[in-house]
Amino acid sequence: MLFKNTQDRFGAVSKTFHWVIAIDFICVMLAGLYLAELADKATALHYFKYHKEFGLLVLVLVVPRLLWRLYSAVPDYVASLRTWEKRLAGAVHFLLYCCMFFMPLSGWIFSSAAGRPVDFFGYTLPNLTQDKALGHFFHAAHQVVGWSLLGIVGLHVAGALKHHFIDHDITLRRMLPFGVKDTGEDKP
Ligand code: HEM
Ligand code: HEM
């Protein structure tokens, strides 16, 4: 398997970052939506500890992911994609990167403002602010963006599935481990 990306393939490092963060992000997102609606507040509070820790893990992982992306430039889109598909995919990827920063940071900010210490696997993180108004703003933003994620992530996944099952191109396979050969036999 390739280590670095090439002009038309994702390498092992980018794939690993993508799938580790994707699984973490989706679990944290679904847990947030579920726990926020749970009537049993004591149970919700207990499990929100994991929501926060695994949410912060996204922030920790997205930084080296972006640095790797700078070092090992992303492959071109599959050649058969139409211009609007490339633009839409680019916009959704950009939004997803913004959310990978915004969701954990907003959660950290409004938890700090509410005076709730934020733990990260045994370490207590510094409080970012005590400003209540700022806390309310980021709390509301965390909720609004949190619900919008269903649409953004849904569009991203639907796009990947469309390319696989309807267009029959290698968009999804080249992001899967061992999905395509490295030899370029099935070049786009
Ligand atoms: C990838 C990171 C994260 C994602 C995708 C995410 C997503 C969500 C979602 C979808 C909700 C439900 C919104 C609602 O209906 O209220 C939520 C709620 C919440 N999140 Fe996060 N979150 C992330 C990180 C964090 C972090 C790092 C913290 C704190 C340090 C945090 C604290 C909370 C709290 C306290 C709630 C409950 C808000 C309420 O309903 O009052 N989240 N999150
Ligand atoms: C089952 C869920 C998912 C599937 C099937 C999936 C599939 C894919 C595929 C096939 C690509 C490659 C697109 C291309 O060839 O240009 C991709 C890229 C990408 N995905 Fe996902 N993805 C999923 C979940 C997620 C999640 C949850 C996030 C973010 C939180 C995410 C963020 C990204 C980003 C940012 C890229 C662009 C890569 C880059 O430019 O660095 N994906 N995804």
Image (tube, rainbow, N blue to C red):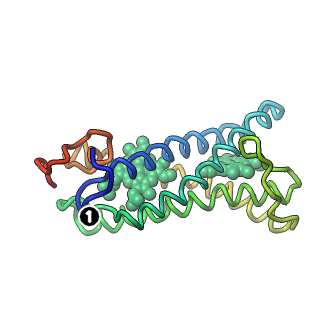
Provide residue 51's location: percent of width, then percent of height.
Answer: 68, 42
Quarter occupied by the N terminus: top left
Q: What residue type is labelled 1?
A: Asp
Residue at x 82% of width, y 35% of height = 41
Residue extending farthest to the left is: 185
Instruction: Say whether residue 45 is left or right of residue 63.
Output: right
Is residue 14 rendered to the left or right of residue 86?
Answer: right
- Determine if residue 155 is in view: no
User: What is the quadrant of residue 74 in the picture?
Assistant: bottom left
Q: For residue 149, say whether it is visible.
A: yes
Residue at image mark 1:
76
Which residue is pictured at 60% across the width and 45% down the height? 29
Q: Residue at x 65, y 50 (%)?
A: 56
In this rendering, the answer to whether 37 lies above or below 56 is above
User: Which residue sits at x=16%, y=55%?
Assistant: 188
Mark 1, Cα crowd under 10 Å, few <14 / some 14-19 / many 20+, is few
Residue 8 falls in image quadrant: bottom left
Closer to the camera, 47 or 38?
Answer: 47
Q: Relative to 14, is 180 on the left or the right?
A: left
In the image, residue 120 above or below residue 64: above
